[in-house]
């Protein structure tokens, strides 16, 4: 795992397109830049200066939760929270 896990921090590895891939100088620069950001972000999280955004999770799978999420977005019922929707079962 490229990120060292710490107590109280959950690490979820995700694919972000070309990020993390090798093969050309541009992507290697992007990866090195991102690797440099990680220690800075960790310090902000540890100090409390940066906090994860609150979120609402809409239960269910398929398109019904997506429709519910769109309605919540339009009506601003989630307020300042991020909306998370799962469209496929694990």
Image (spheres, grey):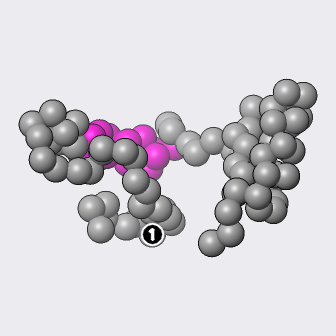
Q: Residue at x 74, y 38 (%)?
A: 81
Q: Residue at x 26, y 50 (%)?
A: 20
Q: Which residues are magenta?
A: 34-48
| Front residue of 20 and 67 | 67
Inspect this view and state whether residue 78 appears.
no
Callout 1 crowding tier (Cα within 10 Å): few <14, some 14–19, many ≥20: few
Q: Residue at x 75, y 32 (%)?
A: 80
User: Residue 42: x, y in percent?
Assistant: 38, 48
Q: Residue at x 39, y 46 (%)?
A: 16
User: Residue 67: x, y in percent?
Assistant: 84, 43
| Front residue of 27 and 51 | 27
Hey, which quadrant is residue 11 in on the image?
bottom left
The residue wearing badge 1 is: 7
Find numbered disc 1 in the image and state the secondary structure of the residue it sits on: loop
Hey, which quadrant is residue 32 in on the image?
top left
Residue 28: in magenta span: no
């Amino acid at each position: 795992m490229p990120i060292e896990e710490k107590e109280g921090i959950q690490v979820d590895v995700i694919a972000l397109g070309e990020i993390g891939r090798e093969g050309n100088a541009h992507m290697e620069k992007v990866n090195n830049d991102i690797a440099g950001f990680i220690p800075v972000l960790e310090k902000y999280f540890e100090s409390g200066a940066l906090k994860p955004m609150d979120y609402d999770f809409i239960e269910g799978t398929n398109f019904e939760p997506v429709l519910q999420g769109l309605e919540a977005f339009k009506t601003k019922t989630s307020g300042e929270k991020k909306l998370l929707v799962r469209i496929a079962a694990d």
